[in-house]
Image (cartoon, rainbow, N blue to C red):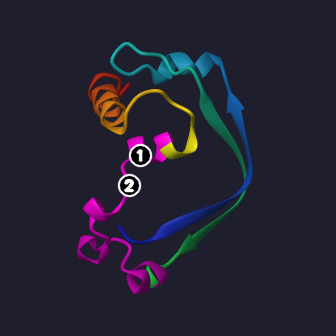
């Protein structure tokens, strides 16, 4: 789907609410949620996305020319681990803690 929705309003972070129990996935209850008080909603046609070619993978940069998240973290935060260790830890975390 190429059409998008713009929402104007205020967002806040919530650490606990009665409805968190309804959001349990694979036995895990969320620890944080975003609540949005919506003032206005606008629908946008797909023209801008089509012009930008945002959804066309062949226009994306070659991932091998970009830094990994591990490299970005290493560059921005004082961490003792190597880039390879950070990237490996991230991949393990993605596999184990999707929910």
**Residue 65: in magenta span:** yes
Mark 1–mark 2 distance (CA, rounded to whole Å): 6 Å
Viewer-closest of 68 and 22: 68
Q: For the magenta stretch, what is the residue range?
A: 48-74
The residue under the point 51% across, 21% down is: 30
Q: Is the magenta stretch mostly helix, strand or loop?
A: helix
The residue under the point 29% across, 22% down is: 96
Q: Mark 2 points at which residue?
A: 67
Give above or below for 59 relative to 91.
below
**Residue 45: in magenta span:** no
| Figure disc tally | 2
Viewport quadrant of the C terminus: top left
Viewer-closest of 68 and 95: 68
Q: Quick one: SS at disc 1?
A: helix
Q: Name the residue under label 1.
A: 71
Return the mark for residue 29.
none
Q: Quick one: SS at disc 2?
A: loop
Q: Are marks 1 and 2 in contact (CB under 8 Å)?
A: yes
Viewer-closest of 46 and 68: 68
Outermost residue toward the top in this view: 27
């Amino acid at each position: 789907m190429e059409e998008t929705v713009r929402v104007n309003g205020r967002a806040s972070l919530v650490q606990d609410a009665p409805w968190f129990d309804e959001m349990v996935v694979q036995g895990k209850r969320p620890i944080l949620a975003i609540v949005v008080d919506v003032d206005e909603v606008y629908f946008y046609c797909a023209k801008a996305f089509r012009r930008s070619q945002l959804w066309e993978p062949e226009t994306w940069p070659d991932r091998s020319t970009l830094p990994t998240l591990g490299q970005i973290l290493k560059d921005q935060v004082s961490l003792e681990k190597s880039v390879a260790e950070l990237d490996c830890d991230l991949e393990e975390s993605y596999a184990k803690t999707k929910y």
